[in-house]
Amino acid sequence: MAVAQQTFDELRTAGLDDVDPQIAELLGRELDRQRGQIELIASENFTWPSVFEAVGSVPTNKYAEGYPGKRYYGGCEVVDEIEELARSRAKELFGAEHANVQPHAGAQANMAVYFAVLSPGDRVLGLSLDHGGHLTHGLKVNFSGKLYEFHHYGVSRETMQVDYDEVLARAKEVQPKLIVCGGSAYPRTVEADRFRQIADEVGALLMCDMAHFSGLVAAGIHPSPVPHSDFVTSTSHKTLAGPRAGFVLCKEEHASKLDRANFPGMQGGPLMHAVAAKAVCFQIAMTDAFREYQRRIRANADALADGLIQGGHDVLTGGTDTHLVQLDLRNTEWTGLAAQERLEECKLTANRNTVPFDERPPMVASGVRLGSPAATMRGFDEDDFREVASIIVDGLNDKADVAALRDRAVALCDKRPLYSGFRGYTEFNA
Ligand code: DSN
């Protein structure tokens, strides 16, 4: 029955199909889209059914401004336990002294840290966006670039990797109050221990944004920035494979400043259903199964990079230490935009990305950023990723048989079905 005809009592028990068939249909189409293409966007993943269940759960109804035991609302005894579990699991998983699990996303996690330790106009040093940083690391049009005096270090022209001597030289020149390491398009290990030495040398605080590689850190595959950093920020939905959300880890000495910066400084009521889902994600990330998943992410990223190189393409830095592979198209006739569009025609989803020292603007770019977490989640192995690399190599050719390449991609999707147990848009909507 159409929503306009439903009574109040009917609406109180009606499902989405009845209330909003348009949105229901779009959700179904989005599920089909996710199932029917190979997801290579390095920052995306397919989360666990248990996380979907927590995200679509009743704490979405609850206001809980404040922190466990110190709320501004009644009825918080259960959500207090949820948040305590999320906090303690985050601390245990990453060996952190303190965790704040309330930031809605990675940008808010970074904002909470800046609000905790910086005043407007303070100097900060971070990796520039066009060398693999992030817009919240001081892009001029972002709050970070507007509020603070951000300076940037880049990667070396020879190695395309961070040159720690150059970072030290920049830090001495800039005298920042905070150094930010990590980023969104850097394929190599972020050596937080070396950033710590640099920060100590110039008397700066250190924040590591591990949003991209936090799953690898949880599994012990990427060195942990936690012992070396004053603050570590992350999302929970990339390699960590949890809900779309953020969190911050810090040393105990910064805990109360961080918590106050997040609330009441920056956010209002936390999204307690998302906090519950973060607790689930941290629990899963402590298992051997999760560590195995992260090992596969790494092996698959290597297979992808090797396949591209063997197919005659340049891969930034010659490979990867993480889940992320940057295809460098500067020696080809392809722009990042054209390549992204061609791959999409072949049922491979990725995003164009500038490469360091790119002469093209970001909307065109000369690179394509690729990642292995999502396809690995649906069961792709190294052979599958070698086939993905081969489809990319064959696709980036003027004479490509796009229909045949699309068939090869669809064959992989059919071999590795996604969310096969789902009855509707999620397992929980029959
Ligand atoms: N948009 C995310 C990424 O793609 O890396 C970072 O915010």
Image: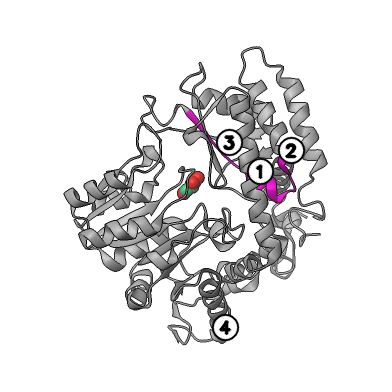
Question: What separation in Å lies between label 3 and label 1 (alpha carbons)?
Answer: 16 Å
Q: Which structural element holds mark 1?
A: helix
Task: Determine the residue positioned at 53% across, 71% down.
Answer: 90
Which residues are the magenta region? 367-383
Residue 136 position, x and y percent, is 36, 51
Q: Which residue is tagged 3?
A: 350
Label 2 packing within 10 angstroms: few (<14), some (14-19), many (20+): many
The residue that label 2 is drawn on is 384
Q: Where is residue 272 drawn, in percent x and y?
A: 55, 72
In the picture shown, does residue 282 fall above or below 177? below
Distance from disc 4 to disc 1, alpha carbons, whole Å, reads 38 Å
Give the mark nearer the N terminus: 3 vs 4: 4
Q: Position of residue 14 (x, y in %)?
A: 74, 64
- Locate the N terminus by quadrant: bottom right
Scheme of colours in the image:
one colour
Asked if the residue under mark 2 is in contact with the one under mark 1, i.e. CB atoms within 8 Å, the reply is: yes
Which residue is identified by label 1? 300
